[in-house]
């Protein structure tokens, strides 16, 4: 828990400092995304390990779902970074390139995720794995301050985790769209190359 909190805070302050000091680079963005993905992957894996210790009839759907989320996060990272590397854009979030994105995608990305939908998505992206681990490990009663105050009630904890899953589901929609856009771009590029070879 403390490692997760420390890593998340360091990631937050690192991003803020880089922007404030104008020290942003493509390599730095890639390292930031890699660190985020590694952190979330480790938490999902910890949740899977804790779930495997329990005799739960819903174990297989949980493990499959969490494993699919891990894979989707990494596939999205590869697609968005490849797309960004092949574009003239300065950042992977500059996804539009002449195409109008669906309103829910724009709502999530608005103001660099500083919108209601963006906040819900980012909350879900980071809290869903943490909440899943917490719940799977059955640590609610063993929590130390300040989490004990927040998660005193099992109902409050479950509500927080469910809200995180709403945000994570929103992320799934965005991730699938980003991956499909990258695949569409590849198909379009290949089609253009075939036409040029025929000419």
Image (spheres, helix red, strand yellow):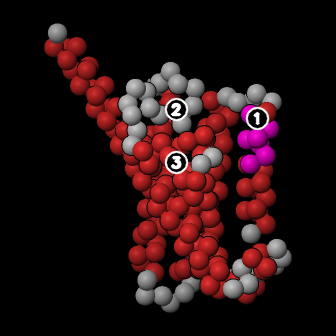
Marks 2/3 in contact by CB < 8 Å: the verdict is: no
Q: Residues within 10 Å of mark 2 (few under 14, many from 20)?
A: few
Q: Quadrant of residue 79?
A: top left
Horizontally, is 124 left or right of 199 in the view? right
Residue at 40%, 50% in the rendered image? 176
Residue 20 position within the rendered picture, expressed as x and y whole percent measured from the top left: 79, 33
Against 165, residue 125 (above or below) is above
Magenta portion: prevailing SS class = helix
User: Can you identify the residue that label 1 sits on?
Assistant: 18
Name the disc covering residue 108, or none: 3
| Spatial CA span between label 2 and label 3 | 13 Å
The stretch of residues the image draws in magenta is: 12-19
Name the disc covering residue 94, or none: 2
Against 12, residue 167 (above or below) is below
Describe the element under mark 2 as helix, strand or loop: loop
Most distant residue in the left direction: 198
* Residue 121 seen: yes
Against 165, residue 40 (above or below) is above
Camera-near label (1 vs 2) is: 2
Residue at 76%, 41% in the rendered image? 16
Camera-near label (3 vs 1) is: 3
Q: Earlier in the sequence, mark 1 or mark 2?
A: 1
In this view of the protein, which residue sits in the foreground, 151 or 52?
Answer: 151
| Spatial CA span between label 1 and label 2 | 18 Å
Describe the element under mark 3 as helix, strand or loop: helix
Against 90, residue 46 (above or below) is below
């Amino acid at each position: 828990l403390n490692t997760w909190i420390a890593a998340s805070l360091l990631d937050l302050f690192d991003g803020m400092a880089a922007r404030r000091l104008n020290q942003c680079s493509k390599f730095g963005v890639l390292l930031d995304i890699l660190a985020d993905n590694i952190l979330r992957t480790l938490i999902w894996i910890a949740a899977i390990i804790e779930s495997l210790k329990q005799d739960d009839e819903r174990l297989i759907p949980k493990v499959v779902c969490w494993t699919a989320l891990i894979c989707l996060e990494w596939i999205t990272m590869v697609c968005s970074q490849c797309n960004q590397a092949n574009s003239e854009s300065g950042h992977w979030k500059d996804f539009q390139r002449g195409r109008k994105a669906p309103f829910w995608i724009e709502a999530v990305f608005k103001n660099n995720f500083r919108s209601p939908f963006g906040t819900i998505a980012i909350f879900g992206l980071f809290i869903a794995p943490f909440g899943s681990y917490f719940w799977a490990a059955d640590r609610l009663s063993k929590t130390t301050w300040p989490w004990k105050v927040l998660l005193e009630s099992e109902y409050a904890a479950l509500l927080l985790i469910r809200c995180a899953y709403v945000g994570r589901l929103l992320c799934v929609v965005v991730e699938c769209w980003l991956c499909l856009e990258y695949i569409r771009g590849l198909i379009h590029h290949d089609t253009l190359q075939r036409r040029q070879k025929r000419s």
